[in-house]
Amino acid sequence: MKTTLDLNDTLLAEAKAMAAHRRTTLTRVIEEALQLRLHANAMPAKRVRKRLPVFHGKGGLRPGIDPRSNASLLQAADDNDA
C-alpha cells in the first residue's frame, strides 16, 4: 500500500543512511521500525521471580582482614598464592 508521510528531515536522513548501510530499502527500514514499536507495546515482558541461593554455613574472613580495605584484601589474596 502506498502512503505519504511527513517526516522530520533529520530522521529521514538517518533512516536513509541506515537503509544504505544495510543495503535495503527505506520502505523496509520503516516497516521494521513500525513492527518493533507495535510488538513492543503488544506483549509486555513477563517477569519471572528467581530465587537467589543463600549460603547459611559458617565462615567469613580470617581475623585481621578488613573487608573495607582494598589493601587488606589484596594482602590476604597474596598470602593465599604462596
Image (tube, grey):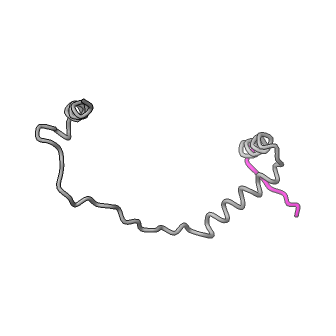
Question: Where is residue 54 drawn, in percent x and y?
Answer: 28, 60
Residue 43 located left or right of residue 63: right
Quarter in which the C terminus is drawn: top left
Q: Is residue 2 magenta?
A: yes
The foreground one among 35 and 9 is 35
Tell me the residue at 15%/42% (across/down). 62
Residue at the left extreme, as displayed:
63
The quadrant in which residue 66 appears is: top left
Residue at the right extreme, as displayed:
2
Dominant secondary structure, magenta? loop
**Vertical side of 5 occupied by 51: above or below:** below
Residue at the front extreme, as displayed:
82
Tell me the residue at 42%/68% (across/down). 49
The foreground one among 79 and 67 is 79
Question: Where is residue 69 drawn, in percent x and y?
Answer: 20, 35
* Total numbered labels: 0
Question: Where is residue 26 drawn, in percent x and y?
Answer: 81, 49
Residue 44 located left or right of residue 59: right
Tell me the residue at 17%/55% (across/down). 58
Tell me the residue at 67%/59% (across/down). 36
The quadrant in which residue 33 appears is: bottom right
The foreground one among 20 and 49 is 49
Residue bounds of the magenta highlight: 1-9
The foreground one among 82 and 11 is 82
